[in-house]
Amino acid sequence: MKFFAFDENVDRQMKMIQIRIRQLMNGEVAGQLATAGLSYSKMYGVSLVHLRQISQQYKPCNELAERLWYRNIREMMILATMVAQRDELSDEKLNEWSESISNIELAEQMAFNLLGKRGNSDGVLEKWLLSPKLYVRYTALMAIGWQFRFVGPELSNLVGEQIDTFDAMGHDRRIVKAVAHCLKMAGRFNSELKTPVEKLARDWVQKSDVHLKAAGEEMLFELGSY
């Protein structure tokens, strides 16, 4: 566990969050999440809707986000992605956080709440795409897709120049969903990328692998080409 200097305000916020999480605890859901293989030191089974409501009670604060993240408790790690000051969180800090991304749920929450809405993230996302850690790559792929929707076209060159790389990544069943999300959002929000993404999707639809075929169909549907 990482240790932090005493901060009366942040410590008070942490205690209030802990109390609220315990109030919303759902043991049955926590058990289902554990059965699904999600790896956290502890889970309370609080819904994402309730976590979103909790996060809205606090101003964005990286000091609070850091403390939440390093508790390695499901609800607190997800809240960290929601309360962080996205554009003030450095690449270095994000790279440190990436060491703790250990399941798809956390990868998707990190991508949607934080990295997918953070400007000037091309460097960290390109690095994460090459990470040896599966869920870090998954996070990067999902985040790139959300970037096209929430931030703009600044990652267009990254996607356009590495279509072959994304094609290869799509053959990994563990991350094909994230690859499809990345590419369909790129093609939807950037007209210059629609043609190469559609071409790749049509190629995937012809494959015998059911996962790749489904991903191709999903991409074509998103692009209005199916």
Image (tube, rainbow, N blue to C red):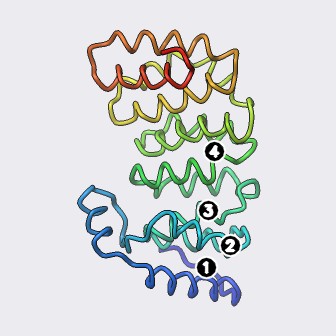
Give the SS element for disc 3. Answer: helix
Q: Residue 116 carries which label?
A: 4
Q: Quadrant of residue 14?
A: bottom right
Q: Alpha carbon of mark 1 to alpha carbon of mark 3: how far? A: 20 Å
Q: What residue appears at the point 70 percent right and 48 percent down from the top-left corner?
A: 118
Q: Alpha carbon of mark 2 to alpha carbon of mark 1: how far? A: 9 Å
Depth check: give the residue in front, 74 or 131: 74
Estimate the x, y position of residue 156 in percent, counting from the top left. 69, 24
Classify 10 Å Cα crowding around label 1: few (below 14), some (14-19), many (20 and above): few
Estimate the x, y position of residue 216 in percent, counting from the top left. 42, 20
Which amino acid is tagged 2?
A: Glu
Q: What residue appears at the point 32 percent right and 69 percent down from the top-left corner?
A: 30
Q: What residue appears at the point 65 percent right and 66 percent down from the top-left corner?
A: 83
- Whether tag 1 and tag 4 are in contact, CB under 8 A, the answer is no
Q: Quadrant of residue 127?
A: top right
Disc with the residue nearer the chain's start (3 vs 4): 3
Q: Indicate which label's residue lies in the foreground, 1 or 3.
A: 3
Q: What residue appears at the point 53 percent right and 39 percent down from the top-left corner?
A: 142
- State whether residue 86 is above or below residue 141: below
* Residue topped by disc 2: 63
Give the SS element for disc 4. Answer: helix
Classify 10 Å Cα crowding around label 4: few (below 14), some (14-19), many (20 and above): many
Give the SS element for disc 2. Answer: helix
Q: Alpha carbon of mark 2 to alpha carbon of mark 3: how far? A: 13 Å
Give the SS element for disc 1. Answer: loop
- State whether residue 197 is above or below residue 50: above
Q: Indicate which label's residue lies in the foreground, 4 or 2.
A: 4
- Whether tag 2 and tag 1 are in contact, CB under 8 A, the answer is yes
